[in-house]
Amino acid sequence: MSACGAGAQTLIQAIRINTGRTGAEQEAALLQWQNFLRERFPLVHRQLECHAPDPWRLWYRWQGADDSSQPILLLAHYDVVPAPSEGWTHPPFEGTVADGFLWGRGAIDNKLSHIAILHAVEALLQSGHVPARTVYLAFGGDEETGGERGAARIAEAFRTLGLTFAMTLDEGALAVRAMLPGLQGPAALVGCGEKGHINVMITGSDTGGHAATPARRDATTALIRALSRIQQSPSPTRKTRSVTAFVRALGRQLSGVSGLLMRSYPLTAPLVHAVFSRRGETDAMVRTTRAITMLAGSLAPNVLPSSPRATINIRLLPGDTIDETVKRLQRLLQRERVTVELASGWDNNEAPEESSPDGRWFELLGQAIHSSLGPMPVLPYLVTATTDSRHYQDMSAQTYRFVPLTLTREQIAGVHGTDERIPLEQVEQAITFYRTLFENLPHRRDHSE
């Protein structure tokens, strides 16, 4: 640990706090996290207005020099998904430094952003820096399960205070290496939008019975036929504002036929969508996706299930409504002996409004990216997952999603998977990103903000 910078040392300690626990252990871990931050960032907690009403919520107000300018809002979350130790090269909650990487659950999603933001603020407070405008920092403890106790309640408190924000920045996209069609070098993807999220239950129905005398077409067979039809009938591709900006910006980085094809979008949408459909990462940008994630049958191996069911996780393109998405699936399966209904008790939401892929706030993020991660194209992007930022959407003029990391496709696979890790030197780069952002905040230009 002695060879690590201060930011990496803090992140190592942060990973060792297992905020992916459940039940009473989870609340204890979240409180431990908040206490850890108070000890690690004393100036932040002495000089900023700090609110920690419960384990799930933590937010700060950093007074700026110009009260006439709208504040900005930065978000992160400190909970993580559970991580059984099986299959990991290094244990997920030890914060191991090996082979030039910092390994552990939350290194990418999303403790790095949280720790880097506070490190940047602590350093600027130490130097006496006052931001050009007021900055709010909001951190939730349950983003991975929907954010209802964390971000949603912080947002409610902000609405009560009558707050609005010129710009909101959350996690979501990052800089990638050799992951985009035709582009081999790194490119920073800044999320200008994100997809919505619903869960749909597909259920077969029959009388059940003994497995020794199965019917030729029982409820399970009907469910299998329905799932097969879902897999064979993907949603149609469609262009959106963020993807249109992404494709055209990507085209400006490419030469030859590929560049011309991208720059001519959306006239060339069928051809571009055909190219994008070859890879999961880009295919998800141009269609509402359906993924079979949970299956349930009978409770015994010799019993035919009377109500076998499957959960379909659907990620909605901006503009697709929940009601129409469910009805589309019902029409697709109307000849199968199954029911299709929106699953209750889950975090179901439509995609929030997309933000501008240009303008001064997008440019400001580009400056911070170049100062911290180095020269690379900065491309608008559609985040195919959901983030806490959607809870604040109605209060913010522009919402962006970016984590200051440059990763390969293999490293990105560690998010919610095994061997989550980041290059060690990138911890300090992330701190530089946020510090640059705070130092370059613009004053109000006119009364339209």
Image (cartoon, rainbow, N blue to C red):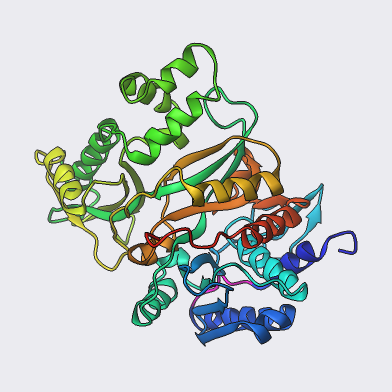
Does 392 sit left or right of 15 as displayed? left
**Residue 342 spot, x, y in % from top left:** 21, 57
Does 360 sit left or right of 127 as displayed? left
- In the picture, which quadrant includes the N terminus? bottom right
In this orientation, does residue 211 appear?
Answer: yes
Residue 213 vertical placement versus 377 (above, below): below
Q: Nearer the viewer, residue 362 or 241?
A: 362
Q: Nearer the viewer, residue 394 or 358?
A: 358
**Residue at x 31% of width, y 62% of height:** 299
In this orientation, does residue 105 appear?
Answer: no
Residues in magenta, as a range: 18-22
**Residue at x 63% of width, y 71% of height:** 18
**Residue 45 spot, x, y in % from top left:** 66, 84
Does 380 sit left or right of 333 as displayed? right
Residue 152 vertical placement versus 439 (above, below): below
Q: Is residue 21 magenta-colored? A: yes
Q: How many marks?
A: 0
**Residue at x 60% of width, y 42% of height:** 175
